[in-house]
Image: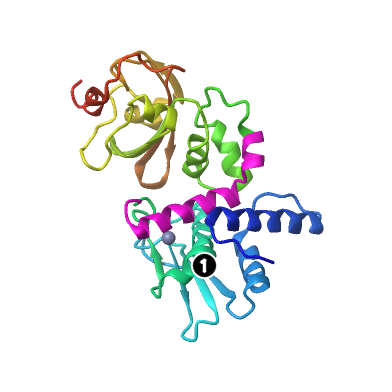
């Protein structure tokens, strides 16, 4: 059988393999367990260079995961950081490294060492491989057919709605929200903040094309004083409709926030009105928060 050459070709192949395998065993389709699938799948396709080891290591947060062969390059190992990761993060990392094995291992002689930050770099060749590995992981763990079905009622979801998906697919809540944002027409954004400052954010394409985004990392942006993200978990509220002038100078924003026990992190889902403001305001929005 002809082998796929792209990440989505491989993702489709693995997804079908997982689905059929579970059906044969009479088990529910989800969650997808990469630790079970990768050794069998790799051996069936590449009997001379299968994945023979998937193991947790304490990388001390330096790496999320790694993929490398033995000296004779006839066996491969996936390692993942077990020291600083939730089950969902580990699952995603394993799938990410599995993608490097299937799609990228022939492109470089170097082993793959993936850290959290370079999983988000995209403007280099390595960044492209990272983006593809993330797309593969999202596709395989949250297959589009099922994900669409699960989220078809999401008009103005709260972050809590994604807890159901987190449990169904055994992924992190941010992975589930990102997967929705990448496919929805809703103008929405995830904002992850730490100690009152935006760590990173990601908006849906409809939101981005209406000029709303935060320039994370390049400038230090505090979350708004009256946002749930700033108020903290003791406040007890989980969702609130803000008027214009809180998260955005021109638009009201619906915010729901979940506080993670890890690293004092707040994960906020912001949804904006269906249609954006009529005039474009990229220049204003960048510093909208700072200028308040
Ligand atoms: Zn990687």
Looking at the image, residue 132 lies above or below residue 146: below
Give left or right: position of 21 versus 101. Answer: right
Relative to the observer, which residue lies in front, 111 or 83?
A: 111
197 inside magenta stretch: no
Residue 5, horizontal then vertical, whole percent? 55, 61
Q: Give the range drawn in magenta.
A: 122-149
- Residue 269 seen: no
Residue 103, horizontal then vertical, whole percent? 51, 63
Residue at the (39%, 18%) spot, across then down: 276
- Ligand 1, what quadrant? bottom left
Quadrant, the N terminus = bottom right
Relative to the observer, which residue lies in front, 164 or 279?
A: 279
Mark 1, ligand 1, within 8 Å: the answer is no
Residue 233, horizontal then vertical, whole percent? 40, 32
Element on which disc 1 rests: helix
Looking at the image, residue 46 lies above or below residue 175: below
Instruction: Spot the residue most to the bottom.
Output: 72
Residue at the (38%, 63%) spot, across then down: 63
- Give the main secondary structure, helix, strand or loop, of the magenta stretch: helix
Residue at the (50%, 69%) spot, across then down: 78
Instruction: Spot the residue most to the front.
Output: 2
Quadrant, the C terminus = top left
Query: Quick one: label 1, few (<14), some, or many (20+) residues within 10 Å?
Result: many
- Residue 171 seen: yes
Residue at the (65%, 51%) spot, across then down: 31
131 inside magenta stretch: yes
Location of mark 1 (residue): 101
């Amino acid at each position: 059988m002809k082998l796929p050459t792209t990440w989505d070709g491989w993702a489709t192949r693995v997804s079908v393999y997982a689905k059929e395998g579970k059906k044969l065993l009479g088990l529910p389709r989800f969650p997808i367990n990469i630790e079970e699938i990768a050794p069998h799948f790799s051996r069936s396709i590449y009997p001379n260079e299968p994945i023979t080891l998937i193991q947790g290591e304490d990388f001390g947060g330096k790496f999320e995961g790694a993929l490398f062969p033995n000296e004779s390059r006839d066996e491969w190992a996936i390692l993942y950081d077990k020291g600083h990761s939730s089950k969902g993060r580990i699952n995603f990392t394993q799938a990410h490294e599995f993608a490097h094995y299937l799609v990228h291992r022939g492109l470089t002689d170097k082993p793959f060492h993936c850290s959290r930050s370079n999983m988000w770099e995209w403007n280099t060749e390595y960044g492209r491989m990272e983006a593809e590995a993330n797309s593969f992981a999202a596709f395989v763990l949250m297959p589009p057919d099922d994900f669409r079905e699960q989220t078809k009622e999401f008009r103005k979801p709260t972050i809590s709605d994604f807890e159901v998906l987190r449990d169904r697919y055994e992924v992190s809540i941010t992975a589930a929200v990102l997967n929705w944002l990448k496919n929805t027409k809703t103008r929405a954004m995830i904002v992850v903040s730490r100690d009152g400052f935006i760590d990173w954010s990601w908006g849906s394409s409809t939101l981005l094309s209406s000029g709303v985004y935060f320039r994370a990392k390049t400038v230090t942006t505090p979350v708004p004083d009256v946002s749930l993200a700033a108020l903290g978990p003791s406040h007890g509220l989980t969702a609130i409709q803000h008027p214009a002038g809180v998260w955005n100078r021109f638009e009201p924003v619906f915010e729901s926030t979940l506080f993670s026990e890890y690293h004092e992190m707040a994960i906020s889902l912001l949804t904006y009105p269906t249609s954006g403001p009529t005039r474009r305001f990229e220049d204003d929005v960048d510093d909208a928060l700072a200028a308040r």
